[in-house]
């Protein structure tokens, strides 16, 4: 089967992602990259060169495993693209083609999520060199690392997909679209269950640290890793929802003017809901959620003073 431009475009995009993934570990230890990550997770470096080296080493290790996972995901994507399963070369492709990019991103996120999860399994490099010095009791849970809008959002998205799949199953349409929706929904459910189990297992592991400062950084990296994992059911849940919604709306559109009105209203509501959730997620700064839960004093230090607060101004210099 000869390839057409959609397949060539997808293969080119995967090649670009592969190049970026391979180069990422090279620039992770750079001060600018470390500083950007520190601002994202809300932890200061305070000009501490030893701390910066330790964090850079952790980020480079995480990037290497993330690169390996991404390359495995790309290797899984290539035969899918070459088979024409994401295009209209097949009956299944005709139904899944509009969501081809969600499928590819879901596979890539799965590979990368597994890679970065493996990166936090061994003890940190500085602990292997110097040995653990402090311990933490009680141990945190997944809820301490992943913001509700992401963790609960994944559950709600997958549950919505399951409800829509039941609705599609009751529609008087051909069996092909029903099987497609069922497959997408089962995939989303499997991803959610797997991520919940893996996340709980990762958090249950010991968390040795040389000092409290590096324990906070370990929490930051754990939080980022668990958020990477949650993105997997979010992506597959979105795929299942849009597959079921498109199937249902296509059937509704065939019912005449009333059906077309329903298609327009529901379609616009889905787009609006997606934009609202995305805006809320960005505004709530989920990358710092772990800090608020586990290190509230440190989190308070990162917050700007409230507008119009009654905090007294510093005294003026004598003779001013």
Image: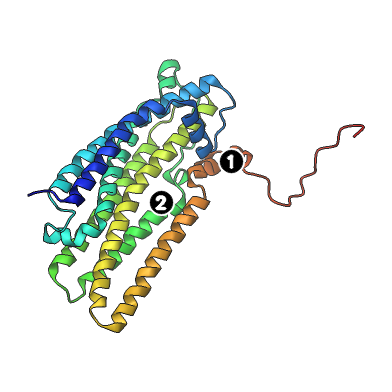
Question: Is residue 248 visible in the rendered structure shown here?
Answer: yes
Q: Which residue is mark 1?
A: 299
- Percent x, y of residue 241: 30, 62
Within-10-Å neighbours for mark 2: few <14, some 14–19, many 20+? many
Q: Is residue 91 above or below residue 76?
A: below
SS for callout 1: helix
Residue 222 in the figure: left or right of residue 94: right
Can I make out residue 136 in this image?
no
Residue 151 numbered tag: 2
* Image position of 202 (left or right of 173): right
The 10 Å Cα crowd at callout 1, few under 14, some 14 to 19, many 20 or more, is some
Eyeballing the image, is 171 above or below 302?
A: below
Q: Residue at x 51, y 45 (%)?
A: 289
- Residue 116: x %, y % from top left: 34, 35
Location of the C terminus (image quadrant): top right
Q: Nearer the viewer, residue 120 or 24?
A: 24
Snapshot quadrant of residue 184: bottom left
Q: Badges 2 and 1: C-beta atoms under 8 Å apart?
A: no
């Amino acid at each position: 089967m000869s390839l057409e431009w959609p397949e060539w475009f997808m293969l080119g995009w995967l090649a670009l992602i592969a190049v970026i993934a391979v180069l990422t570990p090279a620039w992770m230890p750079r001060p600018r990259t470390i500083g950007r990550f520190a601002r994202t997770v809300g932890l200061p470096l305070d000009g501490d060169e030893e701390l910066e080296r330790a964090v850079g080493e952790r980020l480079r290790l995480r990037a290497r495993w993330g690169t390996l996972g991404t390359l495995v995901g790309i290797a899984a994507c290539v035969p899918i693209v070459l088979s024409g399963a994401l295009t209209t070369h097949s009956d299944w492709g005709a139904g899944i083609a509009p969501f081809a990019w969600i499928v590819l991103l879901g596979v890539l996120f799965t590979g990368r999520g597994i890679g970065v999860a493996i990166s936090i399994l061994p003890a940190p490099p500085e602990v292997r060199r110097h040995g653990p010095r402090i311990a933490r009791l009680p141990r945190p849970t997944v809820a301490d690392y992943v913001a509700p809008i992401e963790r609960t959002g994944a559950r709600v998205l997958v549950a919505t997909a399951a409800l829509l799949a039941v609705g599609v199953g009751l529609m008087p349409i051909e069996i092909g679209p029903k099987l497609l929706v069922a497959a997408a929904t089962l995939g989303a459910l499997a991803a959610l269950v797997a991520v919940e189990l893996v996340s709980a297992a990762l958090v249950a592991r010991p968390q040795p640290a040389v000092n409290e400062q590096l324990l906070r950084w370990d929490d930051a990296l754990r939080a980022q890793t668990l958020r990477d994992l949650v993105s997997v059911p979010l992506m597959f849940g979105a795929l299942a929802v849009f597959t079921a919604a498109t199937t249902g709306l296509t059937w509704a559109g065939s019912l005449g003017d009333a059906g077309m009105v329903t298609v327009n209203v529901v379609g616009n509501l889905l787009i609006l809901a997606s934009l609202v959730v995305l805006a809320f997620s960005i505004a709530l700064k989920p990358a710092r959620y772990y800090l608020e839960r586990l290190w509230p004093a440190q989190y308070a230090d990162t917050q700007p003073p409230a507008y119009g607060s009654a905090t007294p101004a510093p005294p003026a210099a004598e003779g001013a």
